[in-house]
Amino acid sequence: MSLKEKTSFRCGHCGKDFEAEIWSSVNSEINPEMRDSVRSLDVFKVKCPHCGDTELVERPFVYNEMQKGFMIQLIPNGSEAEVKQMLNFFSGKGGEGSDVLATLLRRTSDLQIRLVTTIPRFKEKIAILDEQMDDRLVEIAKVLCKTIASKGEDVDAYFFRNPEIDKLCIGFYSPKNQDSFYMELNPEIYDLMKQSYSADIEKLSEPTIVVDEKWARQFIAEHPKE
Ligand SMILES: [Zn+2]
């Protein structure tokens, strides 16, 4: 399902109010023309009719790429309660339709749902999807790369394809120093993660809805390798 909603906005530039339609859900099969707009994040932008200023609007959004069996739910600035409610829904404890979906998710690995709470993390999931990689293995690889690259600094790590060198990379951003750097994600590292952890991932009994650094660290700890 693809959905557009008419919503009221106040322009952050000129301060005037206006109404605009914004997508709350895009299914790439129904609206293939929206694929690029999701990737460029234009889907989140509204233009003020008074001054022409364009703003990125952080609102809940669902992206469905059914042909790849992947759905990404964005709850930006989501409160813990909202995120918990969504997780309950995907695990079968969330009312109508929830149990059916949860059973389906447990039975098949052909449908994957991910929950993210920021637009950059949303963009990262799309980048991984487009490379036809498994985001769980990418998160595990990121933990390893972070250990090598960050020198103990507290940095945020993001997967992306670097258009300048046309290579897969892990970008690091230090909120404290406000600087960023990147390292290449050697495909061999990813393959090694695949060899080491794929079987363990297949054995998981519950669907993995939130796949982030915290998830990866816990997974690594629970599946020690020699
Ligand atoms: Zn304006």
Image: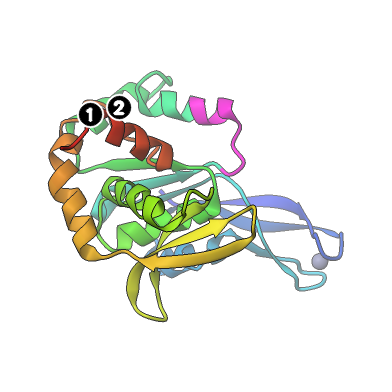
Looking at the image, which residue is at 40% across and 37% down?
210
Q: Residue 81 location, x and y as percent?
A: 57, 25
Residue 3 visible to an observer of this rendering: no
> Would residue 160 be found to the left or right of residue 44 on screen?
left
Q: Nearer the viewer, residue 191 or 153?
A: 153
Looking at the image, which residue is at 74% across and 51% down?
8
Residue 152 visible to an observer of this rendering: yes
Q: Nearer the viewer, residue 39 or 145?
A: 145
Q: Nearer the viewer, residue 159 or 57?
A: 159
> Would residue 130 be found to the left or right of residue 163 on screen?
left
> Given contact means CB atoms under 8 Å apart, are the residues at marks 1 and 2 in contact?
yes
Residue type indicated by callout 1: Arg
**Which label was assigned to residue 106?**
1
Looking at the image, which residue is at 48% across and 48% down?
152
185 relative to 147, above or below: below
- Please report the bounds of the magenta region as a residue range: 76-84
Q: Residues within 10 Å of mark 1 (few under 14, many from 20)?
A: some
> Would residue 13 be found to the left or right of residue 2 on screen?
right
From the image, tell me which residue sits under label 2: 102
Q: Residue 212 location, x and y as percent?
A: 41, 42
Residue type indicated by callout 2: Ala
